[in-house]
Image (cartoon, rainbow, N blue to C red):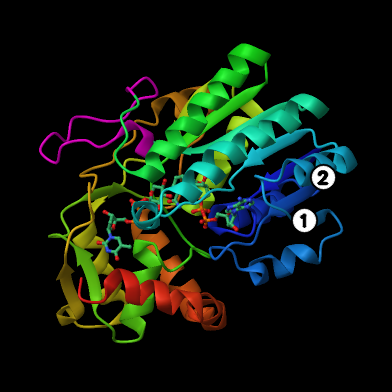
Amino acid sequence: MKILVTGGAGFIGSNFIYLLLSERPAWKIICVDALTYAANIHTLNDAMKSENFTFYKEDIRNRAGIDAIFEKEHPDVVVNFAAESHVDRSIENPEIFLETNIIGTAVLMDACRKYGVERFHQVGTDEVYGDLPLDRPDLFFHEDTPIHTSSPYSTSKASADLLVQAYHRTYGLPVTISRRSNNYGPYQFPEKLIPLMIHNATNDKPLPVYGQGLNVRDWLYVKDHCYGILAVLEKGKVGEVYNLGGHNEKANIEIVKTILAELGKPESLITYVTDRKGHDLRYAIDPSKAMKELGWAPTTMFGDGIKLTINWYREHTEWMRECTSGEYMKYYEKMYHNR
Ligand code: NAD
Ligand code: TDX
């Protein structure tokens, strides 16, 4: 089996590659990543040691470059993690989200049509379903919940999903889509809530909580998500969408207080700042289809996962330093100064 993984130098893609190297050691892995600000090539240091792993620095928007990789490698399966993934950045600059998340996905699928693949899997998000009210804990996102997006990011991801379904219906491309909400774990870029809060708390810097910190997210340990994607590849039905989740809802403020407690830092570091524009209130996934049809279920409880995550960041200060030097400081200043 030869699998082409895009966005493999980012958070979830790299975790997926490490899962494959240990769980499917006979598979050949081709990683394609443009190495944007969100990537850290050192994340793949261990993977590079494997003879089953090949890395290409390429942009999924570059048709000639992508075609050349397909021409040379002829992958059996493609999993698309490559994306602009941060909601706040999409509010500042939507265009690159449209280019990478929509056009990039189309370029990849065109290459899949041209060279033939057994499966194109799109890594999606539950943000395509919009949000749920805070006072209706009985409501969840199902696979047939209408698409109803809030941010330029979620709109670009929804557009990509629709395009994937169109390529299936129009051209018969064998596709699957998985939708997941918030992941946490090793190798997540510190623009996202959990690594940002760990980084700031470790350095005794203020922890910027948007609004009142009452927005709810449905958290999944990244390794559980990666097992879910593998289950969709191996047991999923072509043309189907699978929601991956584990009923693990937490208000942001709860997460921030847990991180402070684990690190032994005072709650006085919490700073309430101006809310995100269009801030989605609550995400909550109904994962029963994936559980029933794929036999998949998450195994990491949040209490254990957050400890594993904090310890990983404690042990990888050099990795964090690489991410937070240079461009990151300018980004942080722009987004959080006087917020
Ligand atoms: P990330 O931002 O950590 O990594 C994205 C990777 O894609 C980076 O390595 C980057 O260099 C690469 N990339 C970006 N633009 C590219 C381009 N034009 N060509 C080639 N490579 C490019 O993202 P992530 O958190 O790992 O998310 C991966 C996927 O999962 C995304 O599609 C995202 O929408 C989806 N997702 C993420 C979460 C989450 O909680 N992080 C939840 C649900 C879904
Ligand atoms: O500094 C912060 N303060 C804060 O209160 C940051 C960065 C975030 N927040 C809040 C906003 C959200 O309610 O924390 C929550 C989580 O924020 P993010 O980590 O930015 O994630 P979110 O916007 O929920 O989107 C994530 O989950 C779905 C991923 O980034 C997406 O790629 C994925 O599709």
Amino acid carrying label 2: it is Ile
Q: Is any atom of residue 53 visible in this view?
A: yes
Q: Is residue 72 above or below residue 291?
A: below
Q: Is mark 2 within 8 Å of ligand 1?
A: no
Q: For the point 40% across and 71% down, which residue is it? A: 331
Residue beneath label 2, please? 69
User: Range of the magenta residues?
Assistant: 127-146
Q: For the point 44% across and 38% down, which residue is it? A: 156
Which is more N-terminal, label 1 or label 2? 1
**The N terminus lies in which quarter of the figure?**
top right
Q: Residues within 10 Å of mark 2 (few under 14, many from 20)?
A: some
Residue found at the far bottom of this picture: 204
Q: For the point 28% across and 41% down, which residue is it? A: 283
Q: Nearer the viewer, residue 73 or 296?
A: 73
Residue beneath label 1, please? 56
**The C terminus lies in which quarter of the figure?**
bottom left
Main SS category, magenta section: loop
Please identify the quarter of the rendering in which residue 111 is found.
Answer: top right
Under circle 2, the secondary element is helix
Numbered disc total: 2
Q: For the point 58% across and 26% down, which residue is it? A: 176
Q: Is any atom of residue 238 visible in this view?
A: no
Query: Residue 232 location in percent, x, y?
Result: 58, 31
Q: Is residue 295 above or below residue 156?
A: above
Are dots 2 and 1 in contact, CB under 8 Å?
A: yes
Q: Is residue 107 above or below residue 249?
A: above
Query: Residue 226 location in percent, x, y?
Result: 56, 46
Query: Residue 192 location in percent, x, y?
Result: 39, 62
Query: Residue 96 location in percent, x, y?
Result: 50, 50
Separation of marks 2 and 1 at Cα, in angstroms = 8 Å
Amino acid carrying label 1: it is Tyr
Under circle 1, the secondary element is strand
